[in-house]
Image: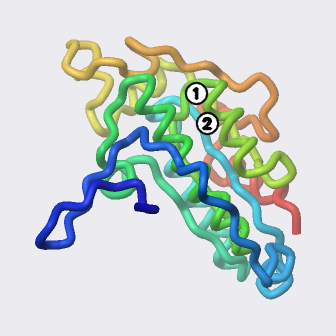
Amino acid sequence: MDDGGLFCPGPRLFIFSKRMKSSEHIVHQAYQIQASDREKSMGQKGQVLWFTGLSGSGKSTLANEVETLLHSQGRHTFLLDGDNLRHGLNGDLGFSEADRTENIRRVAEVAKLMADAGLLVLTAFVSPFAADRAKAREIVGSQRFIEIFVDCPLEVCESRDVKGLYAKARQGLIPDFTGISSPFEAPESPEIHIHTDRSDLAQCRQTIVDFIPS
């Protein structure tokens, strides 16, 4: 069957494998309406703003603030947040290196589709591995991928720790926790480099909004 799932007789129940590959017989369908047509209708260029940084660095807070400002300006946006997607689309994934890679791949594919629709897509994910972020850029397209490094020292992130995650990680209750038991590979040349321990929220937000193509 063409959906990559296993069909069980009776109620419509499909069981999907995380690592199923596309059939060699599947081909791309051509669209009559192109991304450029959708962008013209939207009055803006589809872009993906990829926020990356340690837990507690301020990614989600900053992404929300940026989206709020863009929305107030009449821009068309959508925010994809890591925690929220793990309640749905990526609910079957854990936090092993392989699952984190798959998590980012799925997000990048969704973000690409939304950018094709002409939206300004904001994604807030730790996305700790450089190779995964590079793959996300490749999927989305480098010309419309804006990597935003939300930089903040580990000790400051830990002091914020609003979810209590670092404390649990220090106790060994959360394995493979970025910054404690799993590495964070900092971006070497992001389009935007924000220091949330040095600049206030309004400054960080404006820096990002000013960078976005009109």
Asked if 177 appears above or below 104 in the picture, the reply is: above
- Mark 2 residue element: loop
Horizontally, is 47 left or right of 27 in the view? right
29 displayed left or right of 185: right
Dot 1 lies on which element? loop
In this orientation, which residue lies closer to the viewer: 5 or 93? 5
Residue 120, percent from left and from top:
70, 66
Which of these two is toward me, 94 or 174? 94
* The N terminus - image quarter: bottom left
Q: Are marks 2 and 1 in contact (CB under 8 Å)?
A: yes
Residue sitting at x 60%, y 31%? 197
Q: Which residue was labeled with disc 2?
A: 196
Mark carried by residue 47: none
Give the x, y percent position of residue 6: 28, 55
Q: Horizontal and vertical percent for residue 106?
A: 52, 48
- Which amino acid lies under the numbered mark 2 shown in the image of this protein? Thr
Residue at coordinates 20% horizontally, 65% vertically from top-left? 13
Write down the quadrant of residue 8 in the picture: bottom left
Q: Tell me the quadrant of the picture where the C terminus can be found.
A: bottom right
Answer few, some or many: residues within 10 Å of disc 1's Cα (few below 14, many 20 plus, some between 14 and 19): some
Q: Earlier in the sequence, mark 2 or mark 1?
A: 1
Q: Could you give the CA–CA distance between mark 2 and mark 1, rounded to whole angstroms?
A: 6 Å
Q: Farthest bottom residue?
A: 41
Q: Which residue is at a point 38% across and 12% down the rendered structure image? A: 181
Question: Where's residue 27, x and y in %?
Answer: 67, 61
Q: Which residue is mark 1?
A: 152
Q: Residue at left 39%, top 26%?
A: 159
Q: Amino acid at mark 1?
A: Cys
